Amino acid sequence: MPARTYRHIFFDLDHTLWDFDSNAKSALNDLFLSFNLKERVTTDFEDFYNHYLHHNKILWNRFQKGFITAEELKWKRMWRTLLEYKIGDEKLARSLSASFMEVLPTKTAVFPHTMEILTYLQVKSYVLHLITNGFEQTQWKKIRNSGIDKYFTEVITSEASNSMKPEPQIFTYALQKSGAKLDESIMIGDNLEADIQGAMNAGMDNIFVNHTQAITELNPTFTVTHLNQLENIF
């Protein structure tokens, strides 16, 4: 049993509950077909997708450090991917970006046991919230389309709070908005820097959802490898 009596549980969304990788790949595959990109890039989808992942990771890192804007992140990851195939078409990159942001949140894949564990926690009278670094409109569409919106009392986005995990400000904002006390709250997420170190920065207990068997020198309050293992904590 936990040392503290928790009442408020703050979840991360992407890569913790909502299967971002599966959904992004599916959305990009839809675009690859609808934009007839195979004729333009003369390669298969997997090659295109791997280049996209490479540039998306670099640009997300730059965005999180404040070097580029959200809008630059969205279209330049497409632009850089197209440049891998010597396609310098900014109009196409922007069209791909706009379509991707429309299609992505319609995808509904969540990690195994997501619905079961959220129902379990709700039945046990825990108050559930989300803290996410995503964009407000996009994240809400993901939440509603995947059917998990009914579980959460507050949804705190980096856009609405004007701060990002791991900054302590977003956790302070989340506590204020939810009316939760720090010593009765816990953060659950997959990202060691944003979720776990972020919660530590704010003095909040935390649970590392280690889907990928990552090795870390951090010392989370708890670690699980599957969401259903949360039943052993709560």
Image (spheres, helix red, strand yellow):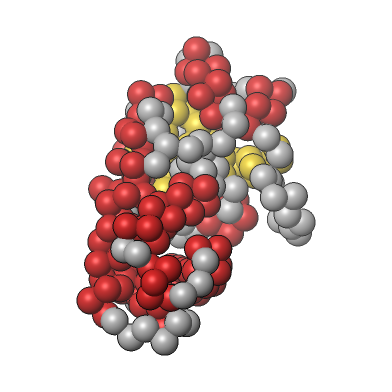
Q: Residue at x 27, y 58 (%)?
A: 99
Tell me if I can see residue 117 in this picture: yes
Q: Against 60, is 21 above or below?
A: above
**Image check: 121 left or right of 210?**
left
Where residue 208 appears, x then y in whole percent?
A: 65, 44
**Image check: 137 left or right of 196?**
left
Q: Against 161, is 6 above or below?
A: above
Q: Quadrant of the C terminus?
A: top right
Q: Against 172, is 59 above or below?
A: below
Q: Against 106, is 36 above or below?
A: below
Q: Nearer the viewer, residue 3 or 80?
A: 80
Q: Residue at x 50, y 12 (%)?
A: 123
Where residue 106 appears, x then y in whole percent?
A: 34, 42
Where residue 162 appears, x then y in whole percent?
A: 30, 58
Q: Residue at x 34, y 34 (%)?
A: 145
Where residue 17 appears, x then y in whole percent?
A: 51, 38
Location of residue 98 (image quadrant): bottom left
Q: State how many labels appear.
A: 0
Location of residue 216 (image quadrant): bottom right
Q: Residue at x 71, y 23 (%)?
A: 232
Q: Nearer the viewer, residue 122 or 227?
A: 227
**Image check: 221 left or right of 71?**
right
Tell me if I can see residue 97 in this picture: no
Q: Quadrant of the N terminus?
A: top right
